[in-house]
Image: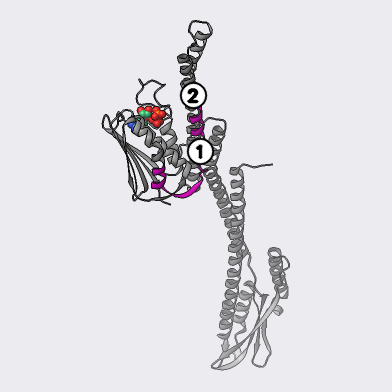
Amino acid sequence: MKYSLKSKLSFSYAVMSLLMVALISFCINVLLQSRFQDYVIKEREQKNTEIVSMIEKQYNGLNGGWNTGTIENIGVSALEQGVIVRLKDAKGKTVWDATVHNNGLCVQMLTHMSENMNSRYPGFKGGYEQKTYSLKSGGQEVGHAELGYYGPYYFTDNDIAFLNSLNSILIAVGVLSLIMALILGAFMAKRVSGPISKSIRAAGQIAKGNFQQRITESSGTREMAQLTDTINHLADSLEKQQDLRKRMAADVAHELRTPLANLQSSMEAMLDGIWEPSEERLESCHEEIIRLNRLVGDLEKLERYEAENASLTISVFDLSGISQLILNNFESEFRKKGIALHFEGKSVTVQADRDKITQVITNLVSNALKYTPEDGNVSVSVQESERGAELSVADTGKGIPPEDLPYIFERFYRADRSRNRRTGGLGLGLTITKAIVDAHGGTIEVVSEVDRGTTFTVTLPKD
Ligand code: ADP
C-alpha cells in the first residue's frame, strides 16, 4: 500500500505534534508538582513557627506558669489547620495535649489526610510525623512544643482543587496546540506536495509526447525550483528534437522529390521511345544519381555528428599543420579556377577530433573555392586568441546577402535559390560544419559583404 506524500507528511506532522505536546505537558506537570510540594512544605514550616511563637507568648515568667486557656484556643485553631499540638513544661510534664483534648478529631483528621493523598497519588508513602520545638522565655528554656502533622507533605482540599484546575488548563492548552499543529501541518504538507504533484503531472504529459507542457508556477523552495527547471529543460530539448526530426523528414522529402521526379520522367520518356537514350541523356541521369548519393551520404554524416555530440575521438595536433595539408590537396583545383590561395599562421596546438576538424576546414575551403570567381583570393589563417585557437577562411567571392546570413547554417539552405541544383551544393556543408564545431564547444562566425567576400572564423576553446 502506497500513501501520498501529502498524507505521509500530514501524518508525520500529527505524530510529531502529539509527541511534542505530550512531552511539554508532562514536563510542565512534573515541574509544577515539585514546585508545589516545596511550597506546601515551606508553608507548613512557617505555620509551625507561628504556632510555636504564639505558644511561647503564653508563658508567664512571674508565676512560672502557662496560660492554659489561651493555649487551648491556639491548640484547637492549630488542629483545624491540621497540626496536633502537645505542650510540655520544662520538667517534661504535659501542659496541654490535643489528643487528650479531642482524640477522635485528631484520628479523623489524619485518616482524611491519608485518604486525600492516596486518592490523588495511589501508594503515597506518608504518615504521622512529629517535630519538637524548644520554648524560651527571657533566654531560659521553659518547655517544649511537640507539633504533629501528616508528612512529608499534605495537600488540602483547596490545594487539590487548585492542582486539578491547573491540569485542566494544561490539557485544554495541549488539545488546542495539537489542533493548531495539525492545521499547520496539513497546510505545510499541501505547500510541499502541491508543486511535486504538478511536476508529476507535467512529467506524465511530457512522457505522453505532449512536449509543449511547461510548469509555469515557480516554487520558493530551492530543490523544487531546480526540479521544475529540470523538467522544463527536458521538455525544451525534447520539443527541439521533435521539431528537428519533423523538419529533417520534410526537408529530405522535399530535396529528394525534384531529382527523383526528373529521373523518373527522363527514364519514362526513354522507355516510351519519346527520347533517344543518348549518351548525353544517360550521363545527365547518372549525374543526378551521383548527386542523390552525395545527399544521402551527407545526411548520414550530419545525423551522426548531431547525434554523437559526445563521442569525439580527441587527440592533440597542430591546427596549422593540418590546415596546410588540406590546402595542399586543394592547390590544383584553385590553380585550375585561377584563384590565389594563401596561408598564414604559426603552430597552434589543439585538443580535438582530427578527422572532424579536417571536415570543417575542407567544407569552408571548398565553399570559398565554389563561391569565388576567377582571379579571386582565398586566405586561410590560424592564430591563437584569448578565446582559443582561431581558424579563418576569407575569400573575395560573391558574398552572402544580409537577409540570408542568419540561415546559412540551417540544413538545405542555399543563399542563391535561382542556382541550378545540379551545379550548386546541397546546402548541408555548413550545417555539418556547425554541428562539429558545436560538439567541440567552439563557435563559428561569419562576416560577409555582397560582391566583396566572406570570412568564416572558427574558434576552438583552449583545453
Ligand atoms: P552548399 O552545399 O550549398 O555550399 P553550405 O551549407 O556549405 O551548402 O552553404 C550554404 C549556403 O551558404 C550556400 O548555398 C551559399 O549560398 C552560402 N555560402 C557558403 N559559403 C559561402 C561563401 N564562402 N561565399 C558565398 N556564399 C557562401
Which amino acid type is shown beneath numbered disc 1?
A: Leu
Q: Tell me: residue 371, above or below residue 326.
A: above
Q: Is residue 431 visible?
A: yes
> Looking at the rendering, which quadrant does residue 403 occupy?
top left
Q: Tell me: residue 408, above or below residue 389.
A: above
Q: Nearer the viewer, residue 16 or 227?
A: 227
Quadrant of the frame with the N terminus: top right
Q: Tell me: residue 121, above or below residue 193.
A: below
Q: Nearer the viewer, residue 334 or 162?
A: 334
Q: Tell me: residue 306, above or below residue 276.
A: below
Q: Position of residue 86 (x, y in %)?
A: 66, 82
Left or right for 145, reference 354: right
Q: Are marks 2 and 1 in contact (CB under 8 Å)?
A: no
**Pointer 2 residue:** 290
Residue 234, numbered label:
1
Secondary structure beneath dot 2 equals helix
Measure the C-alpha gap from mark 2 to mark 1.
Answer: 40 Å
Name the main secondary structure of what is drawn in magenta.
helix
Which amino acid type is shown beneath numbered disc 2?
A: Ile
* Mark 2 burial class by Cα count in 10 Å: few <14, some 14-19, many 20+: few
Magenta-drawn stretch contains 311 = yes
Secondary structure beneath dot 1 equals helix
Q: Nearer the viewer, residue 415 or 178?
A: 415
**Range drawn in magenta:** 296-325
Q: Is residue 406 visible?
A: no
